[in-house]
């Protein structure tokens, strides 16, 4: 059977784009805004909080070093944590703060975070002597190692008012790589921080080891019973909450028309304006006057709001349903006397692009967005204390949580947390919207609670509803909505209620505001990209022409269309919770088939692992990806793949349909498994007769194992060589995921 609709290598480069910091948009709103210079799980943590001693670690040991960086040989050595610390700090001195060594010497995860930090130029500029000397004279005091592949180095390096420098490392393929750094005042404080990092490891293991359910029907019943007894009409539920609490935080996943329509219907309710005086929004506070001008107009004139949305982030926020929400507020106000009208207050960080001329200007406006938003809200409430009506705060759900803690026990200091601290627990009510499991930067990777929530919703007819989390079984499930939020806490510690408006599989991404990318704005957008990325949009390969049509086509591809990564096919089965955290392995079908006996056997690892994820079939060699050169769909990345003769790339995204072996400039056609040993060159040629290895403009195909294992393909490489390849085994639950392949190339006649 010929493959008529093979998925293309585009999937791989979407993944690489995520690793490299690019995406379908130039800038996206962050739910966490983690500092990329420290471990991801610890990004929003309190350095001075005390963690409980972790349990469940293996290979935990501590040893003293007492050597300076300058005492080590001047060569790259990543064989031990202390040698890696020395190597990284010597490179820091030689290349400067923005040097490319940060990527070369960092773990894949940290390299991804660093590339998202737009202020790094990759330009080598040695540190001045006064800054270099403290680094070279830093004394390594001790090394902590746990779980064999994680380590921390405590060094005396006085800087920024702190005496100690704390480096975190991960061993990848035998090399200790940078995972981030922090500062500390005392060894005791540093050790407490290390204990927190160790607790993150234990927490991750806990979250990723949910067991299979022996009796799914009995396990589900309490969830269904709870919904039948406690779930309410969502609009009335939220209105009731607004009547009882000073601030209701409406958590959102961005760009969802269905949820903006709900918010708009809420505003239209006569009860809303009686109870609510102000709506706070996660939008740039420097443009508040534009919104006030919009609301004060006697006619509907959307241009001030569009101007404000163009200021959001780097490339703007062209969300039509959000604009429609503004219109709804304006229309409701037309029927109200001035004293009863709704206010909209923008509380997020400023993006005053007219004042931003370079990176230094941009850095002036970088703030702790959660604290910034909370302080703006509290200040506004105090200034308008005469209005006794309550407030609605619409913000990404990662900012809305009130009391979740990191794996080390320290609080996630979200805007919701800050508001609870400032206003009191009884005055803040946070609502969690239903959605997929989704990283802060990236596509959806699965279903919450492994599909358990949605199974229960389906059992009561998938009707829109809202329900409390402080009682019942839903709130007791481990929080797993955002993978970066590494916590063992349940949902009820983060949110007071849950909002469900229907199955997510049939949702669309918000439509684009018509004319948003005007020719004038495109020129401004190009200027911004030059500030943040160092080159313009055409130079960066983002568009071929710097005009409205090209930019709209480039960034408008997903707007107003079904959310492909939210499809049932991509999210996985609703009953994944039956099988536990390792459901992907459990659901892989094993097809009875004759075992192949010929060919070369190789193993590839998930490309994000920095292990041997790439294969050169002609040479029979495997190698890790070099993320300094492999960034996305750009000429340099493609040239690097060709120069190294790379034919195969292993990808193990959590979405079953997008996992497999990507053939770069390789055509593939599925054949019967029994033909691996006996297929000849003529049969391979016939099987590949109608297969193009440049589909949809992307040079390659995905050889997926979703139809079962083993699975066998006839292949043709870029130089025209024919062969046969079989994916024999896949172990997705391992870290990193492993693919076992068998292949052979036929001799050319």
Image: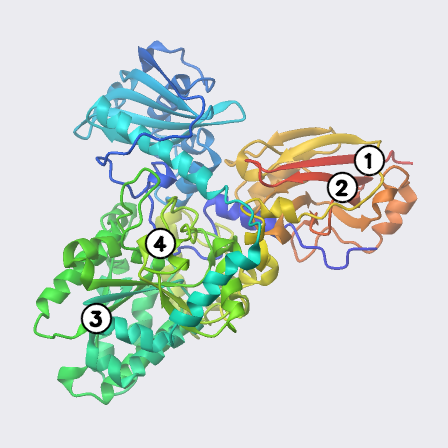
First in sequence: mark 4 or mark 1?
4
First in sequence: mark 2 or mark 1?
2
Quadrant the C terminus occupies: top right
325 over 270 or under it: above or below = above
Q: Are marks 1 and 3 in contact (CB under 8 Å)?
A: no
Q: Position of residue 621 (x, y in %)?
A: 69, 28
Within-10-Å neighbours for mark 4: few <14, some 14–19, many 20+: many
Residue 553 in sight = no
Q: Are marks 4 and 3 in contact (CB under 8 Å)?
A: no
Q: Residue at x 80, y 42 (%)?
A: 720
Q: Residue at x 78, y 35 (%)?
A: 743
Label 2 – label 1 distance at C-alpha: 9 Å
Label 4 – label 2 distance at C-alpha: 42 Å
Q: Which structural element holds mark 1?
A: strand
Label 4 – label 1 distance at C-alpha: 48 Å
Quadrant the N terminus occupies: bottom right
| Residue named by callout 2 | 717
Q: Residue at x 84, y 31 (%)?
A: 598
| Residue named by callout 3 | 244
Q: Are marks 2 and 3 in contact (CB under 8 Å)?
A: no
| Residue named by callout 4 | 31
Q: Which structural element holds mark 3?
A: helix
First in sequence: mark 1 or mark 3?
3
Within-10-Å neighbours for mark 2: few <14, some 14–19, many 20+: many
**In front: mark 2 or mark 1?**
1
Q: Nearer the viewer, residue 170 or 95?
A: 170
């Amino acid at each position: 059977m010929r493959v008529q609709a093979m998925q293309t290598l585009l999937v791989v480069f979407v993944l690489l784009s995520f690793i490299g910091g690019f995406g379908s948009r130039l800038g996206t709103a962050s739910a966490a805004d983690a500092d990329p210079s420290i471990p991801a799980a610890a990004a929003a943590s309190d350095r001075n909080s005390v963690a409980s001693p972790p349990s469940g670690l293996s290979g935990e040991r501590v040893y003293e070093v007492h050597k300076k960086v300058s005492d080590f040989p001047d060569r790259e050595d990543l064989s031990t944590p202390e040698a890696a610390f020395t190597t990284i700090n010597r490179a820091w001195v030689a290349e400067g703060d923005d040097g490319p060594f940060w990527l070369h010497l960092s773990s894949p995860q940290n390299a991804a975070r660093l590339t998202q930090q737009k202020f790094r130029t990759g330009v080598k500029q040695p540190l001045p002597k006064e800054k270099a000397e403290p680094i070279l004279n830093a004394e390594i005091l001790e090394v902590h190692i746990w779980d064999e592949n994680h380590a921390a180095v405590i060094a005396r390096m006085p800087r920024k008012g702190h005496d100690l420098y704390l480096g975190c490392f991960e061993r990848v393929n035998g090399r200790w790589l940078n995972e981030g750094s922090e500062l500390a005042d005392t060894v005791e404080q540093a050790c407490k921080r290390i204990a927190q990092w160790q607790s993150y490891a234990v927490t991750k293991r806990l979250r990723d080891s949910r067991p299979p359910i022996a009796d799914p029907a009995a396990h589900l019943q309490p969830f269904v019973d709870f919904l039948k007894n406690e779930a309410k009409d969502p609009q009335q539920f939220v209105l009731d909450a607004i009547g009882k609490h000073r601030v209701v935080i409406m958590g959102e996943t961005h760009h969802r028309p269905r949820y903006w329509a709900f918010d708009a219907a809420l505003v239209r309710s006569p009860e809303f304006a009686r109870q609510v005086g102000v709506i706070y929004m996660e939008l740039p506070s420097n443009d508040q006057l534009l919104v006030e001008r919009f609301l004060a107009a006697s006619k509907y004139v959307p241009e001030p709001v569009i101007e404000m949305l163009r200021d959001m982030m780097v490339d703007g926020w062209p969300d039509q349903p959000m604009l429609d929400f503004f219109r709804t507020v304006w229309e409701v106000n037309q029927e109200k006397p001035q004293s009863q009208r709704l206010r909209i207050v923008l509380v997020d960080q400023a993006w005053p692009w007219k004042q931003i001329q370079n990176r230094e200007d941009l850095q002036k406006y970088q703030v702790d967005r959660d604290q910034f938003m909370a302080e703006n809200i509290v200040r506004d409430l105090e200034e308008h204390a005469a209005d006794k009506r309550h407030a609605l705060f619409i913000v990404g759900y990662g900012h809305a949580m009130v009391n979740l803690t990191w794996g080390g026990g320290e609080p996630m200091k979200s805007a919701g947390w800050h508001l609870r601290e400032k206003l009191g627990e009884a005055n803040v009510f946070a609502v969690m919207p239903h959605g997929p499991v989704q990283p802060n930067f990236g596509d959806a990777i699965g279903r919450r609670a492994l599909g358990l929530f949605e199974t229960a919703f389906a059992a009561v007819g998938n009707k829109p509803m809202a329900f409390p989390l402080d009682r019942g079984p839903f709130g007791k499930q481990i929080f797993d909505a955002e993978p970066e939020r590494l916590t063992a806490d349940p949902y009820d510690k983060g949110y007071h209620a849950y909002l469900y408006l229907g199955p997510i599989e049939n949702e669309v991404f918000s439509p684009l505001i018509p004319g948003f990318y005007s020719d004038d704005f495109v020129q401004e957008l190009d200027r911004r990209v030059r500030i943040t990325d160092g080159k313009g949009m055409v130079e960066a390969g983002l568009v071929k022409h710097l005009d409205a049509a090209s930019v709209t086509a480039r960034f408008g591809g997903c707007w107003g269309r079904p959310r492909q990564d939210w499809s049932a096919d991509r999210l996985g089965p609703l009953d994944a919770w039956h099988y536990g955290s390792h459901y992907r392995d459990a659901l892989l079908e094993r097809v009875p088939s004759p075992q192949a006996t010929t060919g070369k056997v190789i193993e590839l690892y998930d490309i994000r692992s920095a292990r041997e994820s790439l294969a050169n079939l002609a040479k029979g060699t495997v190698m890790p990806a070099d993320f300094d050169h492999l960034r996305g769909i750009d000429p340099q990345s493609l040239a690097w793949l060709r120069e190294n003769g790379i034919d195969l790339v292993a990808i193990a995204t959590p979405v079953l349909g997008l996992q497999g072996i990507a053939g770069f400039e390789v055509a593939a056609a599925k054949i019967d498994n029994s033909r691996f040993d006996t297929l000849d060159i003529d049969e391979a040629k016939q099987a590949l007769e109608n297969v193009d290895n440049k589909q949809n403009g992307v040079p390659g195909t995905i050889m997926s194992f979703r139809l079962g294992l083993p699975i066998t393909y006839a292949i043709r490489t870029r130089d025209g060589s024919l062969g046969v390849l079989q994916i024999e085994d896949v172990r997705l639950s391992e870290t990193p995921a492993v693919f076992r392949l068998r292949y052979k190339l036929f001799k050319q006649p």
